Image: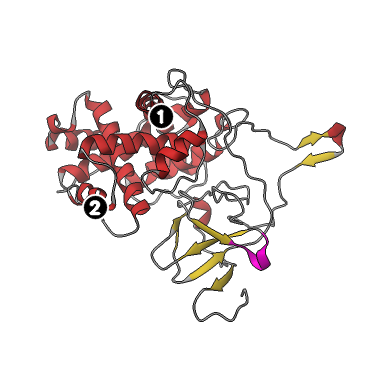
Amino acid sequence: MNSKRSGLSIVFLVFLSLSCVHSRRIVPDDVSGTLIQQQNQITAVADAALVGQTLGSSQVDLQTLKSFVQQRTLNSAGTMDDLVTQAACIIRLEQQTSQAISASSLEVYLTGRGLETAGSKDDLFSRSCDYLQTELQVQKIFGRGIPDITVEELKVELSNLGIASGTGTKFALIYSLGKASKNVQTIKTLLNDPTFNPSSLKALLKERELSQEGTTAEMLTRLATHLLTTSPSQMIGASAYCDLVTESSICLAGGKKMIIADAVPRGLVGRWTFDDENMFDSSGNANHVKRAGTFTSGIHGFGQSASFDGNSMIEIPHSEKYSSNSDFCVTYWFYLLTDSTGQWR
């Protein structure tokens, strides 16, 4: 789900929320165990090692990573894991293109792979990194570089997963295989079933009351996403967003003060207050913004809101909870920067 509005600042629902931000450090040769909960498990380990070696520091902390990303005039909002992934992508892209990250170098990279080049520099970077991750995944499958992998080999691997390859280009086949392979790996890990085969997809989706419509690739994505957001392995001590995860409240000062989750109205599937730097969803459904955008002041100067200038956007990844045959509503406050009445509406 994308949110893009011309010349206005917008917030969906305005509530105060508690955000969780990484304060730990990553030692390049010793990757924190929380990283292995990520969907790109193997890549995450390689990312941390690559970043540590490149930055040449005994420890890579949050500020070092932010500075590294900001030097390329890219959005540096995100968790520790997000910034490690971003930094690793920067390093790999600059190695491949033999030049510093810029809007023009990213456009050339995307054009060469037949991908969309519209959007801001951050959009181009995100799209480039997404494709690069699929290349890395495909290289793991074959154990050799992309130039040494043939179109026919890619088609055979896709066929083995039950995915029609069609007449796509080599780059399109790489993207399809990389995405599908990552999803299969995720499903095997979270189901603790190394024998998982896409032929059992519909049965697994039915057990979880999920839609069984769509292509094999779409169903793999649906099941992998569901497992990532509901698996018990994502609980105590293992979260992509927090260093500490509990299933209930936290008491301070002998129980005099409590930190507790917000009350959630029935039917609410997403609530973005924009009061934390990562634009987290505080509805309890973990539908977090993929990459945080730009902030400005909130209603009457309290809190923050997301700001859009007509070219910027934020992306909220699709969730099965958005799919409904019944009526729904989207509620938000907005403030126009042009043609303004001077009031929030």
Picture mark count: 2
Residue 227 shown left or right of residue 305 in the figure: left
Q: Secondary structure at mark 2?
A: helix
- Which residue is more in the foreground, 325 or 21? 21
Q: Which residues are magenta?
A: 297-302
Residue at 87%, 31% (x, y): give it: 254
- Which residue is more in the foreground, 255 or 227? 255
The residue that label 2 is drawn on is 104
Residue at 56%, 33% (x, y): give it: 239
Q: Amino acid at mark 2?
A: Ser
Residue 268 shown left or right of residue 135 in the figure: right
The image shows residue 264 at horizontal and vertical percentages of 69, 53
The image shows residue 131 at horizontal and vertical percentages of 29, 43
Residue at 71%, 45% (x, y): give it: 261
Disc 2 + disc 1, Cβ < 8 Å:
no
> Which of the two discs, 2 and 1, labels the residue nearer the N terminus?
1
Circle 2 Cα neighbour tier, 10 Å, few/some/many (<14 / 14–19 / ≥20): few
- The quarter of the picture where the C terminus appears is bottom right
- Which residue is more in the foreground, 238 or 182? 238
Residue at 33%, 38% (x, y): give it: 90
- The quarter of the picture where the N terminus appears is bottom left
Q: Is residue 299 magenta?
A: yes
Q: Can residue 191 be seen in this snapshot? A: no
Above or below 299: residue 156: above
The residue that label 1 is drawn on is 44
Circle 1 Cα neighbour tier, 10 Å, few/some/many (<14 / 14–19 / ≥20): many
